[in-house]
Structures are given as structure tokens and as C-alpha cells.
Image: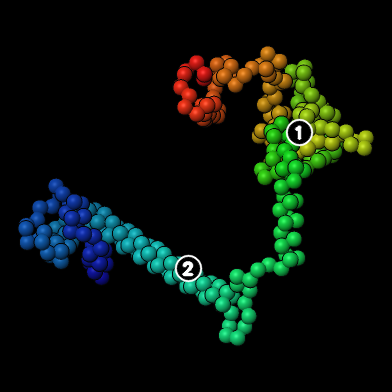
Amino acid sequence: MVDDNRTEALNNLMVAEILHGLHGILSMSMAERKNKAVLVQCVLDHAPGEKVEELTLAGWRKREENANKRKCKWEATSHRYWVKRRRKETECVGDQHLHGTPGEEVDFMQLPSEKELKECYKRFYAATLNDALVAGICGVCAHECGPMDEKLTWWKVAEIPHGERLIVDEGSDHGACDRFKGMLLEPKAVMKREGEMMVSICSLCLGHLRDAKKTTPPRLSLANGLWIGRVPWQLAVLTFAEQLLVALLYPRVFVFKLFLKKMGGTRSTANL
């Protein structure tokens, strides 16, 4: 019974794998090398016991690996089959929706009504107004946020969620920091409405502050050591070329395309 189990395990291995495992341990004739059944019996009869056990375990492992591979292949095939079937069912439903059943009227390629057309224009105008496209500044991270990027919401300074995370020790910041109730905020994003100090906060910073599990300030907030102060006048008035000359890093790539002012004009490097 034991030999039968070992024979079954060794049959899971290839001839090359058996010969490699017995290299330098057991010598075999050419006839035994060519016939796997004879080779397996030779291993059981003449190979050392510990080597037989090692090859037996390798055979069972390979059998399990092959079974797992067949299972994964079957699952992948089954998944593709069901995906293809669901896609076909969806297409059938779509065709029925477009063409309808015999004798039924469909809306395919029908012109919109005047009311629907006016509603489309109304939504388009509302989405392209200046108020809808205006950008704002987040008071927590001082980033300029557009309406298509991170939505800004206005909060009372005293009601900012977990505002204590934005408080920086007075001894660890610069004297020119702008503080509002102890919190380090961007002054351009703070304004007074109806006697209350209001600040605009982007969705990223607000989501971080609302998370009760976190105790640190938002990653890009000024209170997280990213406050660099106001830009000096000497740097604010530099031209773009002058900014490139004094910049230590180039975080952006700019492409300029130059055109001649007159047709048929000559090229001159002095015009650059």
C-alpha cells in the first residue's frame, strides 16, 4: 500500500525531474531512463530511503500545484463565459430598447422637444457662467482650487472640524504667520460675513480634518510645516525668464511657440 502511494506520487514528476533529484546518487541504465515505469520501480527498489521520501513529497506538491492551475484556468474560462453572456444579454436589451417590439413606437433619433431644448441650454449656461468657473483658495493648504477639481466649502473659523490640528506652537513658527483663533490659515481664503470669520476649505483638507481616527494636520496644510511666508517684492516682480535663472528646481515644463510678426520676415536670434 505504501509503495502504491509512492508510485502514484512519483508518477506526478517528469523523468527529467526524477533524474535531476537522483543525480550523483543512483546510476541507471539507458533502458531505465527511457521507460518511466521502470525508472519509478528502480527508484523504489534501489534509491536511499530519505531520497525516496523527498521525491515523494515533491510529487505530491506538484500534483497539488497542477490541480490549482487547472482550477484557476477553469475559473478564468468560466468568468470569460459569463462576461460574454452578460454582454450579449445587455446588447439584446439595448437593441430592444432602440428598435422596440413590433408595432411599438421608439424614441431613437427623435428630435428633442422645445422644452427639453431650453432645459439643455439652461444647464449649459449655468455650467459656463463666471460664478461657476471661478477659482478659489483653500485656507488650510493655500492651494488654488477650481470648480472642476476640489470643491470649496465655507466654514466658520470657530467651527472647523478638529481645528486644533491646525494650531502650531508659537515658538516653532515665524512671527509673520497669520493666525486665526490660533490656527495657521491662508488670509486670502478668510473673510468676514455677517460678523463671523469664514474660511474656505477644499474637499481633501476637509475630509482629513473630519476623520476622527487621524490626529495630524492635513498632509498639504500650512500647519504641517509647509508655510513659506509671503513672496518678497524683489521676487514677485521678476519676469518669467528671470525666475528661471534664479530657480533652484524646475517643477514644471513650459513650452513656448514663437511666431514671426510679419509674413516673409527674417529670423533673428535678437528677437528672442
User: Can residue 111 be seen in this snapshot?
Assistant: yes
Q: Secondary structure at mark 1?
A: loop
User: Residue 90 at what x, y percent from top left?
Assistant: 53, 72
Task: Give the answer, above or below, for where 24 lies relative to 248.
Answer: below
In the displayed structure, would residue 103 be above or below residue 109?
A: below
Residue at horizontal 25 percent and vertical 67 percent from the top: 8
For residue 139, the mark is: 1
Q: Which mark is residue 154?
A: none
Tag 1–tag 2 contact (CB < 8 Å): no
Residue toward you, 103 or 145:
103
170 displayed left or right of 256? right
Residue 214 visible to the viewer: no
Q: Position of residue 181 (x, y in %)?
A: 85, 29
Q: Quadrant of residue 190?
A: top right
Q: Nearer the viewer, residue 135 or 266?
A: 266
Identity, as a three-letter code, of the amino acid under mark 2: Val
User: Which circle marks residue 83 in the picture?
Assistant: 2
At 24% from the left and 56% from the top, the residue drawn is 55
